[in-house]
Amino acid sequence: DFSNLFARDLLPAKNGEEPTIQFLLEVVDILTNYVKKTFDRSTKVLDFHHPHQLLEGMEGFNLELSDQPESLEQILVDCRDTLKYGVRTGHPRFFNQLSSGLDIIGLAGEWLTSTANTNMFTYEIAPVFVLMEQLTLKKMREMIGWPSGEGDGLFSPGGAISNMYSVMIARYKYFPEVKTKGMSAAPRLVLFTSEHSHYSIKKAGAALGFGTENVILLSTDERGRVIPADLEAKIIDAKQKGYVPLFVNATAGSTVYGAFDPINEIADICEKYNLWLHVDGAWGGGLLMSRKHRHKLSGIERANSVTWNPHKMMGVPLQCSAILVREKGILAGCNSMCAGYLFQPDKQYDVTYDTGDKAIQCGRHVDIFKFWLMWKAKGTIGFEQHIDKCLDLSQYLYNKIKNREGYEMVFDGVVKIHSSDLLFCHSHQVAPKIKAMMMESGTTMVGYQPQGNKVNFFRMVVSNPAATQSDIDFLIDEIERLGHD
Ligand code: ABU
């Protein structure tokens, strides 16, 4: 009975050990029930409510904060309600986001990480995690193909931040004085990225003082891949205007089309004009684990920096994103501030393991452990099998849809609904309407968006390790069922 117990009765309170253990066992019970249900196809992906309904307090679920402590019984109810009204992103029929799935080893890793509750900035307080990060980043660099896995890197709070790091270090490489003097020390610098690339490159342009007008968008072919000739033409044009081309982002797995830019051809142009080449492999980086599919990133070994998010295609729990850099030391050169209270040079150990000063953050979450633990538990071969299975499932979906009445491929690989059997055919409204009904019924989830002059279409993401062919079948049937309603 937790109704008369409060947080103050738990450890470190005197006699707090027994209630602490009982309370945590209750929490574990809630979590394991949730885990079981997540993989049960008879449960819904979500129980949707509008924000005002949740804010008004659904069935006693009160989001308001209180001045007085609530009982542990109420706290357990809050834990159950939080999961009840959330979205089961590990459900086999959740296809909505690039990151999905519920990996049990990864989950165990998160629990351990939170229990350890430490900070990545120094070896002093995170010795094991720092070493795990170093070894894992080296392994990732080997997979990229940099000699002996040499180079640098960090886990960062997401792909957008990893991409921002790449722009920062490119600028530091060519214009190091910007660190001390600001952008007035540099000429007008321009960045190049695909019109299909992630918006984070533009965001980095804005945040770092380049200005979004100096992020030049490159034209793509019908499959969303950068046209190298357009890159070269735009570099020449920028130079003629007196601007200084600095940085090119090639995307390996674009957010909507899943397109892979031709890295080798882009690298040739970067070498010719002495530009920094970054590969945003936030989504597609995972393919490096697959001997069958890694050719899609051919040329990545020529990049100066790479973003790779194991929390996407590889199914590692959020968040887990790496910025990997070919040149050792440049992250520290760009970002270090040598705070004396953390990074004392005269510590008793090798202080090159105090990696925190390479980051733009101070405190840094331990994102490595769950990934390291999963890699141990699956082996490289386990990740490879997962990637190969995801691509097989995509092929299954493609084969199922390509000649099916009521569907049209946006291009060879992305699906658009257009049937006259469905409401609002050929209209922007079809996909949003079906998506809304899908969320109300809670049976499955898939995202939609417009792209260029194309009407809203469904973007099917296959990265969920729990998904099977039957779940793909279910999604197709469900879209048709909802479309006919
Ligand atoms: N880089 C963010 C990806 C968002 C998504 O899941 O579509």
Image (cartoon, grey):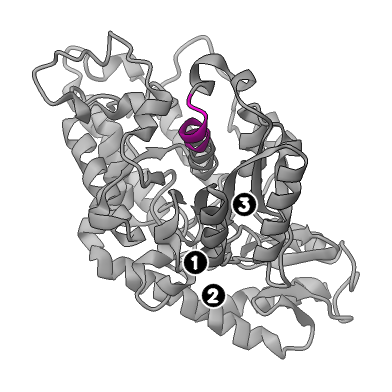
**Rendered residue at 48%/26% (across/down):** 176
Query: Which of these two is toward me, 377 or 266?
Result: 266
Sequence order check, earlier mark of 2 and 1? 1
Residue range of the region highlighted in magenta in the rendering = 168-176
**Rendered residue at 53%/61% (across/down):** 268
- The residue identified by callout 2 is 471
- The residue identified by callout 1 is 92
Q: Is mark 3 within 8 Å of ligand 1?
A: no
Front of the two marks 1 and 3: 1
> Residue 382: which numbered mark, if any?
none
> Would residue 388 be found to the left or right of residue 29 on screen?
right
Q: Say above or below: 111 vs 431.
A: above
Sequence order check, earlier mark of 3 and 2? 3
What amino acid type should be assigned to the residue bearing mark 1?
Pro
Instruction: Check if residue 169 falls in the magenta segment.
Output: yes
Q: CA gap, disc 2 to disc 1?
A: 7 Å
Dot 3 crowding, Cα within 10 Å, few <14, some 14–19, many 20+: some
Dot 2 crowding, Cα within 10 Å, few <14, some 14–19, many 20+: some
- The residue identified by callout 3 is 47
Q: Is mark 2 within 8 Å of ligand 1?
A: no
Query: Which of these two is toward me, 60 or 439?
Result: 439
Is the Cβ of the residue at disc 2 closer than 8 Å to that at disc 1? yes
